[in-house]
């Protein structure tokens, strides 16, 4: 009996079948035999796969659906990759997940990684034999940039299996944000996206690979693939194999709901991610190609890549509906949706009409400037005390004068009283209680600069994204890596950055400057994303919101500032490690969501913003704002407990794994524990700042929707006054 009834799936793309299927079926079976995959023994007897089991799982059919247009030899190679990855997953399960042999598992994974090279050792098992063969057949034809991305995604899907194993061993179920982040690393869909580039001859040019649109395409594709897989594989993974890395289980435990309800929530999130993919492909991708003056062949490759990802999603669904590997009872009967869509085997639960319209309408259902009143605060979970920097009084005096010097009071929407109400020196003093006076002054100024700009962009630029983009382009000129000359700054934002940049980076190495500059540019670019949502009156997709909120709030900037002191002590790859990334994002999310709870009335009622986690939760889950607030508070507590878990359990293991010396261990320990001050300090500042009180909001009210001229030809007239005004 199935654990739940499969929900209606939103799938706007038709599944198509590659005509080379039968020859690839024969090839993949022969290849698996040659690699020894059909003779690999289980520790308790028997073999991992039999020939009959491999035939019934039918990975050739999966690849024929997910890559319908490639030629026969390419389909053979792509199918071999998927036979290898599923064998690796099942072999690792039999060898280590059942026995929970973490030491043996790490040795197995470390040795397997050696086969991603031009000079691999002799293989000792079928997984190594297969990877050695595939690497030699695939990698030589691809560019250095693609190889780098493919090595990263292959590394992640192999090595992060340890995260799953550890959670099984200790009986720990991840929180929703942690799960979705880690599922991308361990689930393999980013790896699949790399193979789409290979199969479709659609390699993404290096200069586009790290842009937001291309990253979001890969992330939304990955999340959709993984969430769909979790729905189909729940029965096997959770009920039969005892695994606890499945979105349905994660949602069951976090929301305290029945399995069927959790499955429906997972499917709603899956639909939202597919629609985010569509939105990105149709709006953001053309814009970035235009901005970077993409050549015709580059445009064609990006277009083929997008189409390849679409084919993978529809084909992957069709294969799940047919494969013996998954729970798929009921998914292959019935008729297509009344509003039109694909028909035939595997399409009964695909509804591009009804479900898609319902979910999309939810994203555009908000009425700006809705009177909501004060949102009562929940009982926040905060296990850490507040510490205050002893130089607070001097920093307050300094900040008032610094703001006057750069013209913070001259723009018309800020005055000294508003700075007093915000009290950013107090914010800096509780975030950085141990720094000296000069560092506290610098941190206070960065915070005041950022919060001023946060108010400035929606008030001055509003829906005029083109003008805001030009303003951002100018801001980049005030962050020269060589500390060379800059233009004459105009307005408080430019003057502030012109002052802060050299004071912050003058003693840093060039790689450190590059890293810090990236955090600042990511933040200012994220403000354009917020303006885009305001202009479209679009409530963001939940995952996109969480990930972009870290940038819009400036928490990535905090991380950048915190890293500066140990930049030359700690190896760069450490900060890309799962442990550090999860620790950082857990703390970031706690602070970001703190701000959203306190600023709910300010943003929803007084500013007409759709960018707030309480509102996002309210609309996505179709609950009232008080229920949404409580869910957000539960999520904050879950992220805090994850931070505590990492600090207590994972940090030392990471030190040992990388063989770090005492200086690096001490620097990283300070860095990790400083987040305690950041989280407790953020909560303390919000509790005492007058910035979010209704009296202050009414004093500062601006009708943002009416600030800019509208109509054809008004953008150019507005430009001189807007930039730096």
Image: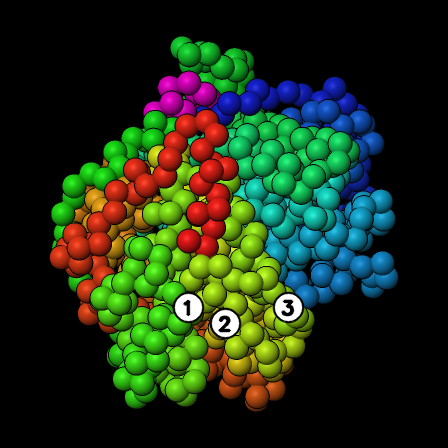
State the mark number for residue 499. Answer: 2
Crowd tier of the residue under label 2, counting other residues whose Cα lies within 10 Å: few below 14, some 14–19, many 20 or above:
some
Say the numbered circle drawn on residue 485: 3
- Give the CA separation, mark 1 to mark 3: 18 Å
Residue at 75 percent of width and 32 percent of height? 296
Tell me which colouring the rendered structure shows: rainbow
Residue 429 position within the rendered picture, expressed as x and y whole percent measured from the top left = 32, 79
Element marked by disc 3: loop
User: Is label 2 in contact with label 1 (beta carbons under 8 Å)?
Assistant: yes
Residue at 83% over, 32% down: 73
Left or right: 373 with respect to 295?
left
Most foreground residue, 393 or 583 = 393
Query: Could you tell me which secondary element the residue under label 1 belongs to?
Result: helix
Q: Earlier in the sequence, mark 1 or mark 3?
A: 1
Residue linked to disc 1? 406
Query: Start and end of the magenta stretch?
Result: 349-358
- How far apart, in angstroms, are the residues tagged by discs 2 and 1? 9 Å
* Nearest to viewer (mark 2 / mark 1): 1
Task: Give left or right: position of 7 versus 631.
Answer: right
The residue drawn where x is 26% and y is 37% is 368
Q: Secondary structure at mark 2?
A: helix
């Amino acid at each position: 009996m199935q654990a739940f009834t499969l929900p209606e799936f939103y799938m706007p793309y038709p599944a198509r079948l590659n005509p080379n299927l039968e020859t690839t079926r024969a090839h993949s079976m022969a290849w698996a035999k040659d690699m020894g995959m059909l003779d690999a023994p289980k520790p308790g007897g028997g073999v991992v796969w039999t020939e009959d089991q491999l035939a019934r799982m039918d990975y050739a059919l999966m690849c024929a659906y997910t890559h319908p247009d490639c030629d026969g030899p390419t389909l053979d190679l792509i199918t071999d990759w998927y036979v290898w990855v599923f064998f690796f997953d099942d072999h690792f399960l039999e060898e280590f997940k059942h026995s929970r042999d973490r030491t043996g598992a790490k040795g197995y994974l470390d040795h397997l990684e050696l086969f991603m090279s031009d000079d691999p050792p002799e293989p000792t098992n079928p997984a190594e034999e297969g990877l050695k063969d595939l690497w030699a057949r695939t990698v030589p034809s691809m560019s250095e940039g693609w190889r780098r991305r493919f090595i990263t995604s292959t590394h992640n899907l192999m090595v992060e299996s340890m995260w799953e194993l550890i959670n099984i061993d200790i009986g720990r179920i991840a929180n929703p944000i942690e799960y979705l982040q880690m599922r991308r690393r361990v689930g393999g869909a980013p790896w699949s996206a790399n193979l789409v580039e290979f199969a479709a001859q659609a390699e993404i040019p290096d200069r586009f690979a790290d842009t937001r649109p291309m990253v979001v395409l890969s992330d939304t594709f990955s999340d959709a693939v993984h969430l769909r897989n979790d729905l189909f594989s729940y029965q096997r993974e959770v009920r039969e194999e005892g695994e606890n890395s499945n979105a349905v289980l994660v949602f069951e435990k976090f929301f305290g709901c029945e399995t069927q309800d959790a499955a429906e929530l997972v499917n709603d999130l899956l639909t939202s991610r597919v629609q985010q993919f569509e939105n990105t492909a149709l709006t953001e991708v053309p814009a970035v190609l235009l901005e970077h003056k993409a050549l015709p062949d580059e445009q064609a490759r990006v277009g083929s890549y997008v189409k390849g990802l679409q084919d993978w999603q529809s084909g992957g669904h069709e294969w799940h509906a047919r494969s013996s590997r998954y729970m798929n009872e009921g998914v292959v009967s019935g008729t297509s949706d009344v509003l039109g869509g694909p028909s035939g085997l595997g399409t009964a639960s695909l509804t591009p009409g009804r479900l898609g319209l319902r979910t999309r309408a939810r994203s555009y259902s908000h009425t700006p400037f809705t009177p909501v009143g004060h949102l009562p605060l929940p009982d926040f979970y905060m296990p850490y005390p507040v510490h205050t920097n002893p130089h607070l009084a001097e920093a307050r005096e300094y900040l008032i004068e610094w703001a006057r010097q750069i013209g913070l009071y001259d723009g018309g929407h800020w005055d000294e009283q508003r700075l007093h109400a915000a009290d950013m020196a107090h914010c800096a003093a509780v975030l950085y209680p141990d720094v000296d006076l000069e560092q506290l002054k610098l941190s206070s100024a960065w915070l005041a600069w950022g919060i001023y700009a946060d108010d400035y962009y929606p008030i001055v630029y509003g829906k005029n994204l083109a003008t805001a983009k030009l303003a951002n382009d100018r801001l980049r000129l005030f962050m020269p890596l060589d500390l060379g000359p800059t233009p004459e700054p105009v307005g408080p934002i430019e003057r502030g950055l012109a002052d802060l940049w050299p004071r912050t980076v003058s003693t840093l190495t060039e790689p450190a400057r590059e890293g810090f500059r990236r955090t600042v540019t990511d933040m200012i670019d994220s403000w354009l994303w917020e303006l885009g949502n305001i202009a479209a009156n679009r409530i963001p997709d939940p995952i996109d919101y969480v990930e972009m909120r870290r940038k819009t709030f400036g928490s990535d900037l905090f991380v950048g500032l915190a890293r500066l002191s140990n930049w030359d002590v700690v190896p760069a790859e450490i900060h890309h490690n799962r442990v550090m990334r999860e620790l950082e994002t857990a703390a970031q999310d706690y602070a970001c969501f703190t701000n959203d709870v306190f600023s709910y009335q300010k943003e929803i009622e007084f500013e007409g913003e759709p960018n707030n986690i309480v509102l996002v939760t309210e609309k996505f889950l179709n609950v009232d704002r008080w229920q949404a607030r409580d869910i957000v508070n539960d999520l904050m507590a879950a992220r805090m407990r994850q931070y505590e878990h990492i600090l207590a359990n994972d940090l030392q293991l990471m030190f040992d794994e990388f063989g770090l010396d005492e200086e690096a261990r001490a620097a990283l320990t300070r860095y990790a524990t400083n987040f305690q001050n950041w989280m407790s300090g953020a909560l303390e500042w919000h509790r005492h700042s007058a910035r979010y009180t209704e009296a202050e909001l009414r004093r500062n009210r601006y009708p943002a929707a009416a600030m800019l001229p509208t109509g054809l030809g008004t953008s150019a007239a507005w430009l001189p006054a807007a930039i730096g005004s």
